[in-house]
Image (tube, helix red, strand yellow):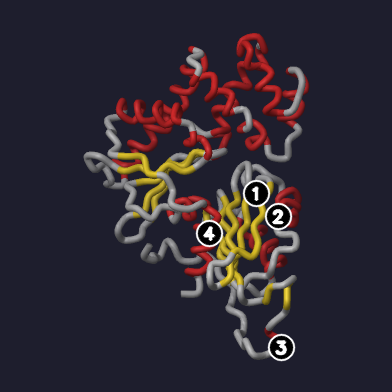
Amino acid sequence: MPRSVCARALWHSPRRSRGRDSASSRRAVGQYVTGSAYLGLDGGGSTSIVRVEDHSGRVLFNRSGGPTNPSVMSPPALRAQFDDLLRDCPEPEVAAVCLAGVGPVSEKRPPIERALRERFGTAVLRLEPDFLAALWCFDAPITACVMSGTGSLVCSRDASGRIATSGGHGFLLGDHGSAFRLGQRVLERYVSDPNSVGDLAPRVEAALDVSGVDAAVSKVYGAVAPPALVARAAPVLIEAATLGYSWACEMLVNEMRPLASTTAEHLVRHSLDVPRPILGLIGGTWTSSTVRQVFRSQLHRCGVTAEAFASPSRQPVQAAVLLAREALL
């Protein structure tokens, strides 16, 4: 994928000295050597993954952990999550960290940079928004990418490299069609009357690892990252819709409709309204054929007939590693 101004590092540290033959420039980290590794970190709203590769692509380190979303987590909680995720991680030459809500003017950016700088020392640091990694997940040409994981967002990259986004806005003001919104809908129904979800009540409780309404409410409001916890109930709603529960089908349509509308508006606003667009779908919500079918039908209602839904060629964390490699080109 060609480089662009938008794809370059939003912030870089100065490069370190690369005297490979100097003993002082080669500090062993475990069995690996400083300066030989490229780190990618995909910070999700529910799950985060870090991956380190050497110059040949050999995986040196891979670990998954909890959410690292600065929009919903306190600085101490976020730092603790980074510490746990990066424990015993080999020191990279370049680190590309892709998180939600860390654009170049975000107030969340400086403290995250400081925390990562403390962790990565002299490594080149590339801090990017999560949607950049999402776009780098597709090898085949796509018209736009529709993200639906814990949150949701529509993004695209034109021929000149300009990146545009629509939707998102976080769990309080947007994220329609996301796992959080689907989980929230079924939890609202459950806490108002557990019997209203029928024989799926135990599935709701199992998703949150609680027993009873009071325990569910208490756990949600006491969570370090509430969206991540609420999103765990999304599969219950999707299952109910797949089984034909009318209330679940209505909820799913009501969530996919605004996401489809945002997608259609994005295509028009950014001159991407081709007759049959190819939409890249990324995020855990799209693993359900029921969700994809409902989304396609709602797109059609918005006047969009998708040529195809493209699946990603790689995981976002692998795309983050590619961004790390690109930083030195």
Displayed quadrant of residue 73: top right
Residue 227, image x, y percentages: 63, 35
The numbered disc on residue 320 is 4
Q: CA distance from mark 3 to mark 2?
A: 29 Å
Identify whether 181 is placed above or below 198: below
Residue that label 3 marks: 23
Q: Is residue 322 left or right of residue 110?
A: left
Q: Residue at x 50, y 70 (%)?
A: 327
Confirm or deny contact between disc 4 and disc 1 (CB under 8 A). no
Q: Residues within 10 Å of mark 3 (few under 14, many from 20)?
A: few
- The amino acid beneath tag 3 is Ala
- The amino acid beneath tag 4 is Ala
Displayed quadrant of residue 114: bottom right
Q: Nearer the viewer, residue 253 or 74?
A: 253
Q: CA distance from mark 3 to mark 1?
A: 36 Å
**Disc number lying in front (2 or 1):** 2
Identify whether 223 is placed above or below 75: above
Residue that label 2 marks: 85
